Image (cartoon, rainbow, N blue to C red):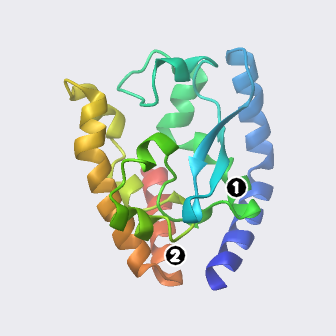
């Protein structure tokens, strides 16, 4: 109950505080490239329930045809998209998902069904027992994921065989130990990372 209350109050406060900056970001996206302001994609939520995530669009509208992963200086990313990704501003619309109850401020990052299908059964059960979040230990640990993938000979294999298992281990550990205090600490760490970018 305390976690959900934190989510509601935090997402409402964030949406109110970021309404004007968010409108300016939306205008920049529209002026920079054709297509919608928001990127919507199916992700897997708590107990395996699918939902459509909200993000500011940072790529061309046809980007998914070339694959799911963002690798290094991906040419599909727009000019405004590069700025948004560098400062994690593309994630801000997920406050809508938090308010709707599909996500939490803190929780394992939601994956697309294709990668969730690869989760080992025991880890899948633990990770999907909690709401996915905007931030978690894995998202802090893998801030340089795009660069790591760019350095790999086979980015898809690197993600599936190296990055995803490590992310899952961190996510499962979070899910096992989650509390209001761990969430507050992770929010504080995330704000610190964003402030120093």
Q: Which residue is mark 1?
A: 97
Q: Nearer the viewer, residue 77 or 86?
A: 77
In the rendered image, residue 132, in percent from the top left (x then y), is placed at: 54, 61
Image vertical order of residue 136 relative to residue 114, above or below: below
Looking at the rendered structure, the secondary structure element under dot 1 is: helix
Q: Earlier in the sequence, mark 2 or mark 1?
A: 1
Image vertical order of residue 91 relative to residue 17, above or below: above
- Mark yes or no: residue 197 visible: no
The disc at residue 179 is none
Image quarter of residue 2: bottom right
Circle 2 Cα neighbour tier, 10 Å, few/some/many (<14 / 14–19 / ≥20): some
Q: Which residue is mark 2?
A: 184
Looking at the rendered structure, the secondary structure element under dot 2 is: helix
Check contact, mark 2 vs mark 1: CB within 8 A. no
Please tell me which residue is depicted at 57% across the width and 27% down the height of the picture: 81
Q: Nearer the viewer, residue 53 or 114?
A: 114
């Amino acid at each position: 109950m305390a976690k959900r209350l934190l989510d509601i109050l935090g997402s409402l406060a964030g949406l109110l505080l970021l309404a004007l900056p968010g409108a300016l970001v939306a205008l920049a996206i529209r002026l920079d490239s054709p297509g919608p302001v928001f990127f919507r994609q199916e992700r897997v939520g708590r107990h395996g329930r699918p939902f459509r995530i909200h993000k500011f669009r940072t790529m061309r509208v046809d980007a998914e045809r070339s694959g799911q992963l963002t690798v290094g200086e991906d040419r599909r990313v727009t000019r405004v998209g590069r700025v948004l990704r560098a400062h994690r501003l593309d994630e801000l619309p997920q406050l809508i998902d938090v308010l709707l109850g599909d996500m939490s401020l803190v929780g394992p990052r939601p994956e697309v069904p294709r990668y969730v299908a690869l989760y080992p059964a025991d880890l899948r059960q633990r990770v999907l027992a909690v709401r996915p979040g905007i931030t978690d230990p894995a998202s802090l640990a893998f801030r340089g994921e795009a660069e790591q993938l760019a350095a790999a000979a086979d980015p898809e294999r690197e993600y599936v065989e190296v990055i995803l298992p490590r992310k899952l281990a961190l996510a499962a550990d979070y899910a096992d130990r989650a509390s209001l205090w761990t969430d507050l600490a992770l929010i504080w760490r995330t704000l610190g990372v964003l402030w120093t970018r």
